[in-house]
């Protein structure tokens, strides 16, 4: 049924095809944005863990100086 409609009306077929193509592109753009957002969130979590790790790390030179001062 649809094929007969589109064969008889090629402009309608072109318009519908274009609408579907644009809708697919919109979905792909949306997926790309979500992927980028997830990557940024992972980077932020990683940076926070690095900050916490550095805050817990003891600098050997500083620890030695503190021992000699006591």
Image (spheres, grey):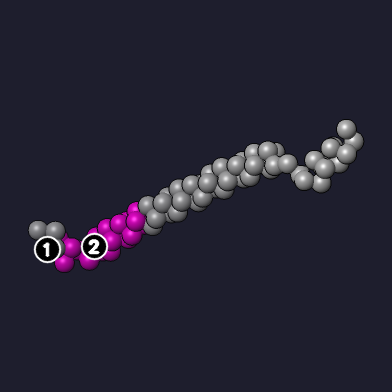
Main secondary structure along the magenta-highlighted residues: helix
Query: Under tag 1, what secondary structure?
Result: helix
In the image, which disc is placed on residue 4? Answer: 1
Name which residue lies at 85% across and 37% down.
Answer: 66
Q: Nearer the viewer, residue 61 or 29?
A: 61
Q: Position of residue 54 (x, y in %)?
A: 69, 43
Q: Quadrant of the N terminus?
A: bottom left
State yes or no: residue 14 in magenta. Answer: yes
Residue 22 vertical position relative to residue 41 in the rendered view, above or below? below
Q: Which residues are magenta?
A: 4-24
Q: From the viewer's perspective, is 13 left or right of 46?
A: left
Residue 66 vertical position relative to residue 6 in the rendered view, above or below? above
Q: Residues within 10 Å of mark 1 (few under 14, many from 20)?
A: few
Residue 32 vertical position relative to residue 59 in the rendered view, above or below? below
Q: Quadrant of the C terminus?
A: top right
Q: Residues within 10 Å of mark 2 (few under 14, many from 20)?
A: some
Q: From the viewer's perspective, is 26 left or right of 67?
A: left
Q: From the viewer's perspective, is 25 left or right of 66?
A: left
């Amino acid at each position: 049924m649809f094929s007969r409609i589109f064969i008889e009306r090629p402009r309608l077929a072109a318009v519908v095809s274009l609408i579907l193509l644009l809708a697919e592109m919109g979905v792909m753009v949306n997926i790309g944005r979500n992927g980028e957002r997830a990557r940024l969130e992972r980077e932020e979590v990683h940076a926070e863990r690095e900050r916490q790790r550095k805050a817990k790390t003891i600098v050997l030179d500083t620890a030695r100086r503190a021992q000699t001062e006591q």
